[in-house]
Image (spheres, helix red, strand yellow):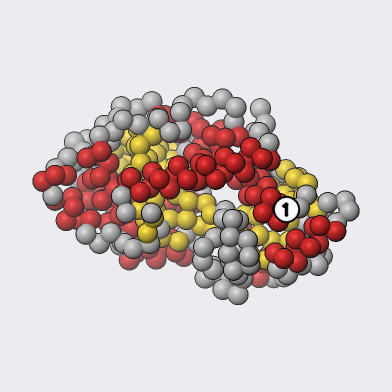
Amino acid sequence: MLTRRLALAAPALLASPALAWLPDRPIRLVIPFTPGGTNDIIGRLVADGMAQRLGQPIVIENRGGAGGMIGADIVAKAAPDGHTLLLGGSGSLVITSFVHRRLPYDPIRDFAPIGLMGSAANVIVVNPQVPASTLRELQAVARRAQPPLTYASPGVGSTGHAAGALLAQALEVEMIHVPYRGTGPVLTDLIAGRVQVFTNALAPMQPQVLAGQLRALAIAGRQRSTALPDVPTTIEAGFPSVQAATWFSLFATGGTPPERLRVLHAALNATMAEPEVRRRLTEGGVDIETSESPEAFWQFYLAERARWGEVIRRANIQAEG
């Protein structure tokens, strides 16, 4: 299981004779997105802390495109020696692998687990014209709606698309998917009332929620948001299956020796224990969440794949192109 307890003993683990391996040259961290986004910010922050502990610089390589597949493919085909890492996540490694018909790699065989860094739960919002302040009320409205309510996403096959499908399945209602090209256009039409429902990370919607232009119904995670403390979680609202957090993690190339994964995991968890790292990530809307071991993280990864795979199959979601 995953734990929020910090691995305070990680520096001692690095010094253990059983974990004597340390990298002998710079490490490459592939971030499968363009610079400036949340993944990039987290990756650079964590890379600095891990580099201090591993005694080698960690060089960031941004390789965005194809929903994360381009960057993931680089790591999948690298030498399995612990010197090439991937900043992977729920969207880039889990959802992308189900919505694309052809992948250039095997999402299980070609990657090895290091550990989780944190997660950011999505928030479910509606246009204020929708007469619902809770998920139960939204369920009732959706069951009566003719034509069906619409839910927006930043694009076909995106995390938002899968999260909207998950919501409709949990509420046991029909909602029509309306894809956009990015979050910005979604917010424009959502505020105007041209679509009714949206599930997405809070950060880009927070000003509109606080201004009353959008109504937040629930946090799709295990704990309430410090930014919206009065908004209940989906668990509190009675729909515990609606978990749609975006999580961030580290992987190595498949076949990397377990002892090297354990060293990298210890360096990661020690970095995540730093007060300044915790402060900066928390202020950015990321909840610190670490793994007890690479093996525990791998079980979490497999469980996420099973959960989202079922959602995507039921909704018949396929990426465009």
**Which residue sits at x=37%, y=59%?**
3
User: At 29% across and 48% down in the image, what residue appears?
Assistant: 265
Residue furthest bottom as drawn: 230
Pinpoint residue 150: horizontal percent, then vertical percent: 78, 51
Q: Quadrant of the N terminus?
A: bottom left
In-image side of 129 versus 103 (left or right):
right
Q: Is residue 167 left or right of residue 95?
A: right
Q: Which residue is mark 1?
A: 172
Q: Position of residue 133 (x, y in %)?
A: 73, 70
Q: Nearer the viewer, residue 240 or 95?
A: 240
Residue at the image point whose x is 65% and y is 49% from the top: 166
- Write down the quadrant of residue 309 in the picture: top right
Q: Nearer the viewer, residue 274 or 21?
A: 21
Please determine whether, in this image, residue 181 is positioned above or below residue 280: above
Q: Position of residue 274 (x, y in %)?
A: 30, 62
In the picture, measured across the screen, residue 304 lies left or right of residue 216, that is left
